[in-house]
Every structure is written in structure tokens, then in C-alpha cells.
């Protein structure tokens, strides 16, 4: 029994108690945690061999029996994975003829290493983050899971966090190396397991994403039109510091009226539009100063300089966005999209035609037609989308929020009769 990323050895000690005749090996990279695992096993009076090593570097001896891989791989996102480990991952996935994504978290590497160390008939069970079920970059893990003989997925209720130190959805995965049988998919809530359904590897691999907690196996999307056939979907504008760049009563007094731009700054603006956003006078305004402040009058420049000094003291110049634009105060609002949509919540997204012609912040997505589309067609489309888009088409996050990334929005199927005319 291999406890991969053992930490203090809780799984290893539990396994040694349950199977006293098995060879139990705990593998932990951190020397302090490895020492704690040794102490844990000693106090529990069980035999556990602790190896202080990176799991990706481990080689296991061949044994005549079955090896079980068990663990809770560390939740490490791609930003914190070394370049050497990423090369290792990409090279091994390529040798298997599988896609690889550099956005994958470290838990995917642990699955891969377990598969490389295993032989037909070996088994495994990892508790991991579940975003790979639904994300585009999760294709790598989904392909690997099927290749390694994945046979069970137990999806945890996203409102009941499994990991204390990470706000993420979770899934308990099981596999039998060499198996090509169906995958049993169920849910876990309040300590109770709810059986769901079974799906073949072929069915799952035909889907652009796998169903998250509570969702059934969706049918393969028909070959009909998709939202992305008619629109480019993109996020709204990132200001870098909304408390500064969304004008309040005080800052509005310092900024010339022509640089105060009515803008969709809250998803509630879309929800309350009832399908068509007609008015801009009730919206908040964004401060969108020019790159060249020399076009201001002397009096305007004095007041704007006062505002910028306050903004800088507030930290607006130090944000990541401000540090990567020139000049730092130039928000540079994008052109208003034809249709706007909310994209995060505990309900389906809401769509509205942007009759007011206002820009949007990144609390919304903008839909820009790739070819001219009549207003009447846009109205019909918005009405259909508001009635027919389900949360199951989005991506579930820790806490139960559902988010639609632009690519997910572009995959929303449209009815065949919804072909839009000019």
C-alpha cells in the first residue's frame, strides 16, 4: 500500500492497522512531515516504511501481489510547480499519447506517476480537487483517468469543503489498472453516499466536460448551432482597483464629466434589465482618463492630479493590472458589446441586449456578433437564452458557485430554428 504525499501518515497508519500483513509505504517530500509520519506509526505501534522523497522520483520494487495507491495529493496549482516537474509531466504524457496542459495542478502529476508505477490489477483511490472534471485544461486528467482504468468518481457536495486550506470542489477517485469497465459516478453529502449512474469511458471521453456534483450524464451535444457560431464572447474590462476607478460622490467631483463613463459594474444591472438594458443614467460610472493628461485644462489637471494622488495612496498604482499598462491610470474601457451576460452565481446566467450601448466591467461577459445581426434577432436570442440555459453548462466552484468561462458560453447550444438573420 502506497500513501502518496503522506503528510503525517494518517492513511498509511490506518492501512497498516487494517492490513497488518501488507507492506505499507508512506512517501512524503517534506522532512518534517516525514519525521512526523514515523512518529505517528511508532505511537500507533504499526509497521510503516517512510520514504522522504518527491513522489515523482520514486521507484518501487516489483512484487507478486497487488499494489494499492491511496492518498490526498497536495493541492498545488500550476503557478507553484517547478519547470523541471512540468517537463517531466509533459514528456511522460506525450509518451502515452495523451494531451497535457501546463495549467494542470500537482494532483494530476500524482495520478500520472501512480499509473507509471502500476501494473495491471493494481488499484488506487485519491481524494483530489475536482475542477478537472469541468475545465478545458482538465482534458489531460480526464484522458489519463480513462487510460489508467478509472472506475469510480464520488463527487463531494461543493458547499461542504473537504480541504480546510483550499476553497475547491472535491472528488474521490478510484481506478483499477488495466480496467476498461464503466465508471460508477455518485455523490457524497453530509457523510452519506448517493449512488448515481454509470458511464463508459467512451461516453465520458466524447464529452467536453464531465458532470459535476448532482448533475446527470448529459447527452453528447448535437451538431447544431452554438452561441460561438455567431458571437465572440469575452470578459468585461478589468480596472485593477474597482473601489478607485468606479466613481463615488467624492471622486466624481474631481473628474471631468466626459471621463465618467456609465458602465455595467454589477450583475444586478443585468438581472434587473429584464432582457434589454435601456438606460444608462442609473448605472455607476467608471473613471476612464486619457493616456495624455495634457488635453485637460489647467483647472481640470489640478483636480485630476489630486484624484491620482489619492488613488496612488490607496494602492491603485500597485495593482497587477496597473503595473502592466501604460500609463497606470488608463483603464481603457472596451467598446460596448451587443449583448451582455452575468457569468457567476447560484443560478443560470442572465442575458440582456445592450440597448444603452455601455461598456462592462469584468463582472459580466460581452457577446459581440461576428456578423451583423438584427435587433429583433438579438431580442429573440436573449429571450431564448434566459429561458433555456442551465447551470449544468457552467463550472462548479467551491462553495457551490457556478461560473461560465467564455469558452463554456460559446459552447451553449442553440435550437436549429434560432439561426440569426441580419
Image (cartoon, rainbow, N blue to C red):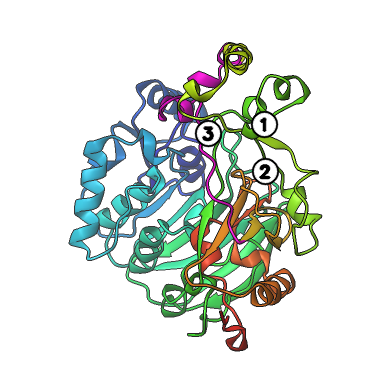
The reply to whether residue 59 is in sight is: no
Residue 422 at x, y = what percent? Answer: 56, 79
Residue 354 at x, y = what percent? Answer: 67, 59
Most foreground residue, 224 or 206: 224
Q: Nearer the N terminus, badge 3 or badge 1?
A: 1
Q: CA distance from mark 3 to mark 1?
A: 11 Å
Left or right: residue 39 compared with residue 284: left
On whether residue 176 falls in the magenta region, the answer is: no
**Residue 116 drawn above or below residue 241:** below
Q: Label 1: how many residues lie within 10 Å, few (<14), some (14-19) or many (20+)?
A: many
Residue depicted at 61% across the width and 35% down the height: 164
Most foreground residue, 216 or 134: 134
Residue picked out by circle 1: 246
**Residue 354 drawn above or below residue 228:** above
Q: CA distance from mark 3 to mark 2?
A: 13 Å
Q: Secondary structure at mark 2?
A: loop
Residue depicted at 57% across the width and 68% down the height: 185
Task: Give the main secondary structure of the magenta stretch.
Answer: loop
Residue 108 at x, y = what percent? Answer: 38, 50
State the extent of the magenta-drawn residues as a range.
311-338
Left or right: residue 147 compared with residue 202: left
Q: Nearer the N terminus, badge 1 or badge 2?
A: 1
Most foreground residue, 272 or 76: 272
**The label number, if any, that marks residue 263 in the structure image:** 2
Looking at the image, do the residues carrying marks 1 and 2 touch, with CB atoms under 8 Å apart? yes
**The label number, if any, that marks residue 331 in the structure image:** 3
**Residue 374 drawn above or below residue 394:** below
Q: CA distance from mark 1 to mark 2?
A: 9 Å
Residue depicted at 21% across the width and 48% down the height: 61
Q: Nearer the N terminus, badge 3 or badge 2?
A: 2
Left or right: residue 93 compared with residue 77: left
Amino acid at each position: 500500500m502506497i500513501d502518496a504525499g503522506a503528510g503525517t501518515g494518517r492513511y498509511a497508519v490506518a492501512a497498516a492497522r487494517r492490513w497488518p500483513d501488507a507492506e505499507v509505504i508512506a512517501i512524503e517530500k517534506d522532512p518534517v512531515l516525514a519525521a512526523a509520519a514515523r512518529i505517528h506509526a511508532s505511537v500507533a505501534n504499526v509497521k510503516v516504511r517512510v520514504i522522504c522523497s518527491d513522489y515523482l522520483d520514486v521507484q518501487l520494487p516489483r512484487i507478486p501481489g497487488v499494489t494499492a495507491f491511496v492518498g490526498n495529493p497536495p493541492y498545488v496549482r500550476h503557478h507553484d510547480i517547478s519547470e523541471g516537474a512540468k517537463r517531466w509531466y509533459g514528456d511522460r504524457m506525450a509518451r502515452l499519447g495523451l494531451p497535457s496542459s501546463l495549467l494542470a495542478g500537482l494532483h494530476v502529476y500524482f495520478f500520472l506517476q501512480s499509473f507509471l508505477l502500476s501494473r495491471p490489477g493494481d488499484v488506487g483511490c485519491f481524494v483530489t480537487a475536482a475542477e478537472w472534471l469541468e475545465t478545458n485544461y482538465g482534458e489531460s486528467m480526464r484522458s489519463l483517468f480513462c487510460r489508467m482504468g478509472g472506475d469510480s468518481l464520488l463527487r463531494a457536495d461543493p458547499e461542504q469543503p473537504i480541504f480546510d486550506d483550499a476553497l475547491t470542489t472535491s472528488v474521490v477517485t478510484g481506478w483499477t489498472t488495466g480496467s476498461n469497465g464503466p465508471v460508477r459516478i455518485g455523490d457524497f453529502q453530509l457523510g452519506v453516499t448517493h449512488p448515481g449512474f454509470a458511464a463508459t469511458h467512451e461516453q465520458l471521453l466524447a464529452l467536453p466536460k464531465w458532470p459535476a456534483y448532482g448533475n446527470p450524464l448529459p447527452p453528447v451535444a448535437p451538431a447544431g448551432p452554438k452561441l460561438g457560431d455567431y458571437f465572440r464572447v469575452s470578459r468585461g474590462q478589468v480596472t485593477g482597483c474597482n473601489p478607485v476607478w468606479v466613481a463615488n460622490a467624492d471622486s466624481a467631483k474631481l473628474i471631468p464629466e466626459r471621463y465618467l463613463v456609465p458602465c455595467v459594474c454589477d450583475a444586478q444591472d443585468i438581472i434587473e434589465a429584464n432582457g434589454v438594458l435601456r438606460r444608462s443614467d442609473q448605472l455607476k460610472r467608471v473613471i476612464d482618463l486619457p493616456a495624455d493628461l495634457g488635453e485637460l485644462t489647467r483647472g481640470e489637471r489640478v483636480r485630476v492630479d489630486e484624484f491620482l494622488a489619492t488613488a496612488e495612496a490607496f494602492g491603485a498604482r500597485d495593482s497587477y493590472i496597473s503595473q502592466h499598462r501604460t500609463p497606470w491610470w488608463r483603464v481603457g474601457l472596451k467598446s460596448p458589446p451587443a449583448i451582455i451576460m452575468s457569468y457567476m452565481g447560484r443560478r443560470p446566467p442572465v442575458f440582456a441586449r445592450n440597448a444603452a450601448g455601455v461598456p462592462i466591467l469584468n463582472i459580466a461577459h460581452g457577446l459581440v456578433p461576428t456578423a451583423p445581426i438584427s435587433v429583433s434577432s438579438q431580442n429573440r436570442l436573449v429571450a431564448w437564452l434566459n429561458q433555456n440555459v442551465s447551470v449544468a453548462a457552467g463550472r462548479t466552484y467551491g462553495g457551490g458557485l457556478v461560473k461560465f468561462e467564455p469558452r463554456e458560453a460559446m459552447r451553449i447550444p442553440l435550437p436549429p430554428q434560432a439561426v440569426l438573420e441580419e
